[in-house]
Image (cartoon, rainbow, N blue to C red):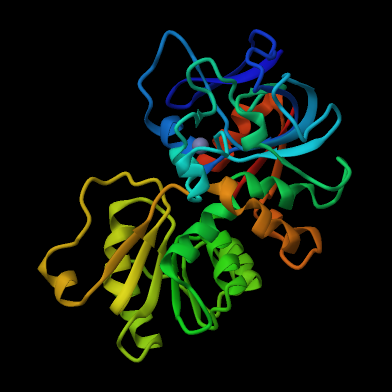
Amino acid sequence: MRATLIYGAGDVRVEEVPDAALREPTDALVRVLRACICGSDLWPYGSMEPAEQGARIGHEFVGIIEDVGAEVSGFKRGDFVVAPFVWSDGTCDFCSEGLPTSCRHGGLWGRDGVDGGQGEAVRVPQAQGTLVTLPVGEDDALLPSLLTLSDVFPTGHHCAATAGVSSRTSVTVIGDGAVGLCAVLAAKRLGAEQIILTGRHEQRTDLGREFGATDVIPERGEEGIERVRALTGGDGTHTVLECVGLEPAIETAFGVVRDGGVVSRVGAPQYADVPMDFGPFMRNITLTGGVAPARAYIEELMPDVLDGALQPGKVFDRVVGLEDVSDGYRAMAGREALKVIVEP
Ligand SMILES: [Zn+2]
């Protein structure tokens, strides 16, 4: 079968790899219908050292079950399913506590002999705990929005949920990437009335307004902080959703959070330190967030997608075939595309 491998910065290739096949009785074999490129795939794409051996990549996909192992129940050949971006057993103590990303028997796509998502098929370990059935046809118009349940929408939701966003909290969202826009959508869904989005890419911030942003702040740094404070009586917002992962973003987050407020981060951090010194201490700032346990949120978020109330799939603005996946990476890295669907 064909699948995507990354060999280093700027070097993504589609190659012939061994066919995905059942190995354990807890596996399922899934033919990938649609995958997508994640903002987090752009970190290795931007900085990975050149390697002799390519590494499988991709962790967001929906597909059709081709086969299931003897110990997998509740799924059968032909089922349309979504896979969250971390696989997990669904039964261990961490999974039971709603944290499948810490599953004792789970892991990441593309590592340790597990297929990556950007390919023709995937062996899904711990299939019963990992996969969720999509109760629609595979050519459904909802497909792009259902694909976001794999990562980007639950990640935006995790940011808003861990921050404690509700109808009583004002919100600042840092970042107009696909995660930031999904965080806006999630904050709106949780009842927030004031949602300030920082970003300067007009097409993206326009989608942010459609998703529920009430104000858009294009300025960065001190100027951006002043603008948010001016919109909030000088105090900042109760919650700040940091959806970038770079140092200036987390610094801005602490600059715009109201005393007693919460900063939540879901942008994969490319920094080592956060400003949690005496100043934020005296202001009683809470820092939360982390990798999103997407699997734990899919059932909660799916109904609003199925009935069309929310359309997170609008973050996709380009589709490429598997053979052209490198064009998709180039477009996303160059910010020509917001988020790219890969169609095997
Ligand atoms: Zn588990």
Q: Is residue 252 above or below residue 20?
A: below
Q: Is residue 30 above or below residue 172?
A: above
At a point 55% along the width and 38% down the height, the residue shown is 91
User: Would you say 164 lies left or right of 151 here?
Assistant: left
Q: Quadrant of the N terminus?
A: top right
Q: Quadrant of the C terminus?
A: top right
Q: Is residue 10 visible?
A: yes
Q: Is residue 70 above or below residue 183?
A: above
Residue 129 position, x and y percent, is 62, 36
At a point 81% along the width and 37% down the height, the residue shown is 80
Q: Residue furthest bottom?
A: 233
Residue 202 position, x and y percent, is 56, 65
User: Would you say 225 lies left or right of 94 here?
Assistant: left
Q: Is residue 336 visible?
A: no
The part of the image, by quadrant, that contains residue 21 is: top right
Residue 157 or 321: which is nearer the viewer?
Answer: 157
User: Would you say 195 lies left or right of 81 here?
Assistant: left
At a point 73% along the width and 49% down the height, the residue shown is 146
At a point 51% along the width and 82% down the height, the residue shown is 194
